[in-house]
C-alpha cells in the first residue's frame, strides 16, 4: 500500500515570512547603513548637489523609506496572523525563518539593483572612491540570503511532508 502524504500547505506562511523579511531587510539597511554607519542616505547618489547635500531632504527621504518598511512589516504581521494555523505544523519555525531570510535577501537584491545600479540615487558606500565593489557585495549578500532562506524552506517542508 502506498503512503498518502498531505499536500504542502506552507504557502501562506512562506509568503508572510518573505514580506516580513523584506521589511526587516529594509529596517536593517536603514538603521545600520543610513543611521548607525552613515554610509549613505536615500538621495546621496543624486547628481544634483542641492539634493545630494541637503541633509534635511535626505533625512525626510530616509524617514519615508522607514515608514514604507514599517507598513510592509504590518502587512507581513497580518499575513502571519492569517497563516497562524501553519505555525503549529512540524518545522514551521524553520519555514518562517527561511522565508524571512529569503525576503531579506530579496530586499537587498531589488534595492541594490534598483536604487544603487538603475536609478543611481545612492550606493552602499558614498565615502569611498569606488562604490561598485561595495554595491556588488550588497547584491551578493542578497543572493546568499535568498539561497540560504529557500534552502531552509525546502528542507523544512520536505522533512515535514516526509513525516506525515
Image (cartoon, helix red, strand yellow):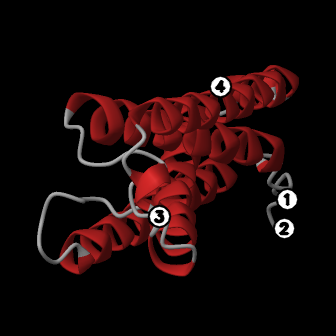
Q: Tag 3: Cα neighbours inside 10 Å, few (<14), some, or many (≥20)? A: some
In terms of image quadrants, where is residue 162?
A: bottom right
Q: CA distance from mark 4 to mark 1?
A: 42 Å
Label 2's element? loop
Residue 4 badge: 1
Question: Which residue occupies the foreground of this view, 97 or 8?
Answer: 97
Return the residue at label 4: 70
* Tag nearer the camera, 4 or 1: 4
Q: Residue at point 40% right, 59% down? A: 49
Location of residue 76 (image quadrant): top right
Within 10 Å of the Cα at label 2, are there few (<14), some (14-19), or many (20+) other Cα atoms?
few
- Name the element at disc 3: loop
Q: Residue 122, position in %: x, y? A: 41, 61
* Residue 59: image location, x then y, percent: 47, 31
Spatial CA distance of label 3 from label 2 is 66 Å
Q: Is residue 91 visible?
A: no
| Residue position marked by numbered label 3 in the rendering | 46
Q: Earlier in the sequence, mark 4 or mark 1?
A: 1
User: Which residue corresponds to mark 2?
Assistant: 1
Whether residue 55 appears in this view of the structure is yes
Amino acid at each position: 500500500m502506498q503512503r498518502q502524504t498531505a499536500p504542502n500547505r506552507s504557502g501562506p506562511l512562506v509568503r508572510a515570512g518573505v514580506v516580513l523579511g523584506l521589511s526587516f531587510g529594509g529596517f536593517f539597511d536603514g538603521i545600520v547603513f543610513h543611521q548607525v554607519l552613515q554610509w549613505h542616505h536615500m538621495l546621496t547618489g543624486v547628481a544634483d548637489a542641492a539634493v545630494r547635500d541637503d541633509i534635511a531632504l535626505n533625512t525626510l527621504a530616509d524617514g519615508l523609506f522607514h515608514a514604507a518598511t514599517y507598513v510592509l512589516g504590518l502587512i507581513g504581521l497580518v499575513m502571519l496572523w492569517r497563516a497562524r494555523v501553519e505555525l503549529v505544523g512540524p518545522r514551521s519555525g524553520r519555514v518562517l525563518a527561511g522565508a524571512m531570510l529569503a525576503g531579506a535577501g530579496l530586499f537587498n537584491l531589488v534595492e541594490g539593483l534598483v536604487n544603487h545600479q538603475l536609478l543611481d540615487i545612492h550606493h552602499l558606500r558614498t565615502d569611498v572612491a569606488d562604490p561598485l565593489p561595495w554595491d556588488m557585495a550588497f547584491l551578493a549578500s542578497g543572493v546568499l540570503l535568498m539561497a540560504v532562506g529557500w534552502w531552509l524552506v525546502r528542507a523544512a517542508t520536505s522533512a515535514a511532508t516526509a513525516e506525515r
